[in-house]
């Protein structure tokens, strides 16, 4: 059941991040990929900022916020590297 939760959080995070960044959406699969990679990036950065951070026991919305922030960073980096508004 946890994998389904990851996919739902990933899809939401990817879609919300792409809307914030003005990209439109990347489709269901693209949004899931952006959201999941964003969750890894966001979790890594939160761990650097607060080494005692653990998502154990936190609400699902905490994971969503971290994934959205990571996905925004991912979209920003991809756009900076490619030099345009290319799809991820």
Image (cartoon, grey):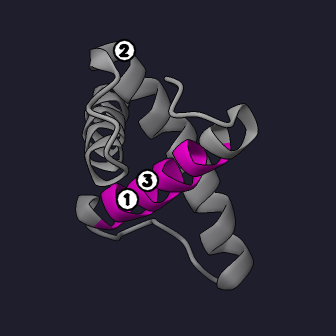
Tag 3's secondary structure? helix
Q: Is residue 77 above or below residue 65?
A: above
| Crowding near the residue tagged with mark 1, few <14, some 14–19, many ≥20 C-alpha atoms within 10 Å | some
Front-lying residue, 4 or 48: 48
Q: Is residue 50 left or right of residue 5?
A: right
Which mark is first along the chain, 2 or 1? Answer: 2
Instruction: Tell me the quarter of the picture where residue 65 sits.
Output: bottom left
Q: Position of residue 17 (x, y in %)?
A: 35, 48
Q: Is residue 64 found inside the magenta-colored segment of the image?
A: yes
Q: Is residue 46 found inside the magenta-colored segment of the image?
A: no
Q: Which residue is mark 1?
A: 63
- At x 25%, y 40%, the residue is 12
- At x 37%, y 50%, the residue is 21
| Crowding near the residue tagged with mark 2, few <14, some 14–19, many ≥20 C-alpha atoms within 10 Å | few
Q: Which residue is mark 3?
A: 67
- In three-dimensional space, the C-alpha distance between marks 1 and 3, rounded to whole angstroms, equals 6 Å
Front-lying residue, 37 or 50: 37
Q: Which residues are magenta?
A: 62-77
Tag 1's secondary structure? helix
Q: Is residue 83 left or right of residue 20?
A: right
- In three-dimensional space, the C-alpha distance between marks 1 and 2, rounded to whole angstroms, equals 19 Å
Q: Which residue is mark 2?
A: 29
Front-lying residue, 49 or 53: 49
Q: Are marks 1 and 2 in contact (CB under 8 Å)?
A: no
């Amino acid at each position: 059941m946890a994998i389904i939760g990851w996919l739902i959080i990933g899809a939401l995070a990817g879609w919300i991040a792409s809307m914030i960044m003005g990209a439109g959406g990347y489709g269901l699969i693209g949004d899931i990929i952006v959201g999941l990679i964003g969750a890894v990036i966001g979790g890594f950065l939160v761990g650097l900022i607060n080494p005692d951070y653990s998502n154990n026991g936190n609400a699902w919305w905490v994971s969503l916020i971290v994934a959205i922030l990571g996905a925004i960073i991912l979209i920003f980096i991809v756009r900076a590297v490619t030099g345009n508004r290319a799809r991820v």
